[in-house]
Image (cartoon, rainbow, N blue to C red):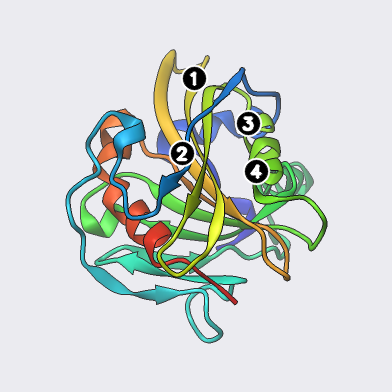
Amino acid sequence: MRVGTVRVRRGVAQVALLAGVLTGCSGGSDEEPESRASASAEASGGGGSAAVKSGGSVGAAGSACALPVTFDVAESWKPKAVEAGSAEGEGELAEELAAALLHQGPVTAACEIDAKPAGNIGFLRVWTGEPGDDDARSVLKEFVAAEKGAGQAKYRAFKTADGVTGAEVTYMYTSEALDETKEERALAVATKRGPVVLHLGGLDTDEHRAMLPAYELARRTLRVG
């Protein structure tokens, strides 16, 4: 994906809002008990318990996106690496704006997995950061805090059947320009190669919840290394 045309946060309906999407701070947060990675969307209030087939994995060398983690991608979802190269012919302002959108808190966009071929409007996006001492929860809180319009965040720990541990958050995102509030969620894990954040948005809350099985597949099959 070229930086000048990347849609790193909201999709078609919010391309006009690029300048404000990744700035600002979040609302308050509450802690929730630890959740197992095999759980369905209990924290969301429903919508994510349906099974979904795997369409392969991403993250390993030679896959669509080389990442510090690997996980299964839902059938028909299409992964694509986010390129950090310059946007030729797009102009300096466009380049600066797109470059800003590639960063949120301590992490940078590395991969986006498009749900459109599976019939949904949204992306599962992967963000990666530099190695450091911050734990998964700290990284996740910084990620949410960097998103203007994020609030009502509820954090919890998770652990997969393979022993991968991390932090997860469910929160509400409010777009002032579109006068709309929707549910979103993300998880973070710490690796030797740096932190990794997986974020699931969606056009609205209904679309978000319809895509939860794909998110849960990724979380359930998440492996570090």
Farthest residue, direction right: 132
What's under tag 1, amino acid-wise?
Answer: Thr
Position of residue 111 measured from the top left corner of the image (x, y, whole percent): 54, 62
Position of residue 153 measured from the top left corner of the image (x, y, whole percent): 53, 26
SS for dot 4: helix
Which numbered marker is on residue 147?
Answer: 3
Q: Which corner quadrant of the image does residue 151 belong to?
A: top right
The Cα–Cα distance between marks 3 and 2, rounded to whole angstroms, is: 12 Å
- Badges 3 and 4: C-beta atoms under 8 Å apart? no
Left or right of residue 11, residue 103 in this image: right
In this orientation, which residue lies closer to the viewer: 165 or 97?
165
What's under tag 4, amino acid-wise?
Answer: Arg
The Cα–Cα distance between marks 1 and 2, rounded to whole angstroms, is: 13 Å
Q: What residue is pinned by disc 2?
A: 185
- Badges 1 and 2: C-beta atoms under 8 Å apart? no
Mark nearest the camera among 4 and 2 is 4
Answer yes or no: is residue 183 visible.
Answer: yes
Residue at x 52% of width, y 81% of height: 60
- Badges 3 and 2: C-beta atoms under 8 Å apart? no
What's under tag 2, amino acid-wise?
Answer: Arg
- Return the disc, 4 or 1, that comes first in the chain's sequence: 4
